[in-house]
Amino acid sequence: MNHQASLIRRGVGALVCAAVLMVMQALAAGAARAADDSLYRALGGEEGITRISAGLVERAYADERIKHIFQETNPRFLAEQLRKQFCELSGGPCKYDGENMKNSHAKLAINKAHFNALVEDLQAAMDAQGVPFIAQNRLLALLAPMHRDVITR
Ligand code: HEM
């Protein structure tokens, strides 16, 4: 084989390598994207999260332990804000545009027992939608650190 042919073969080899690398990178990026919205999908996607948020609000407004805290708040507004927040947190295609957790809960005098009651209501709302236990815990783990901003008493 002459020198020129060998150079051409090397060039083609390098191009094939680059193409293979690009395909692998694209596959890896696709897999990462799929993994990112796995919680969103486990919660039932848009429909599931809409029902979970509505179910949570319904339970909280009927819950003797905490219903007094919701008296001034429009349930439809709250369910919609929670829907957007849970959707974004779980990797779904939404953007939460509401007030931050510190400001929105500052005047509500929420204590640990109130917080735990709401968590129970959320678990019940997820149970009612057949959300698997592992997915429930993943959402709760994302919400748990917010207790610092929500509990003020
Ligand atoms: C991790 C726990 C919690 C999360 C993620 C959460 C999330 C939210 C969100 C997204 C809003 C709407 C904020 C806005 O756009 O104005 C909100 C408001 C509210 N939350 Fe929470 N919340 C949590 C805990 C609690 C607890 C424990 C209570 C009471 C038991 C509570 C009672 C309320 C009330 C009454 C409002 C409406 C405030 C208003 O009318 O301005 N929240 N919450």
Image: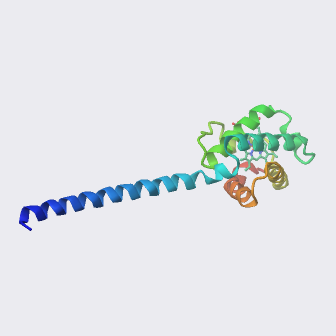
Percent from the top left, x then y, of residue 21?
35, 59
Residue sitting nearer the eye, 139 or 19:
19
Return the residue found at the far front. Answer: 1
Q: Foreground: 11 or 30?
A: 11
Residue 54: image quadrant is: top right
**Vertical placement of residue 10 versus 130, above or below:** below
Q: Is residue 51 left or right of residue 36?
A: right
Residue 88 visible in the shown view: yes
Foreground pick, 20 / 30: 20
The residue under the point 75% across, 53% down is 131
Residue 140 x, y percent position in the rendering: 72, 56
Relative placement, left or right, of 87 versus 32 is right
Whether residue 106 can be seen here: no
The residue drawn where x is 56% and y is 56% is: 35
- Which quadrant of the rendered structure holds the N terminus? bottom left
Please state the horizontal and vertical placement of residue 104, each as a whole percent of the image.
71, 40
- Residue 88 vs 22, above or below: the answer is above
Q: What's the colour scheme?
A: rainbow
Task: Find residue 98 and report its image quarter.
Answer: top right
Left or right of 15: which side holds 36? Answer: right
Q: Quarter for ligand 1?
A: top right
The residue under the point 65% across, 49% down is 41
Q: Quadrant of residue 76?
A: top right
Q: Residue at x 90, y 41 (%)?
A: 62
Q: How many marks?
A: 0
Residue sticking out furthest to the right = 64
Residue 101: x %, y % from top left: 68, 44
Residue with the most extreme bottom position: 1
Looking at the picture, does residue 22 appear above or below residue 105?
below
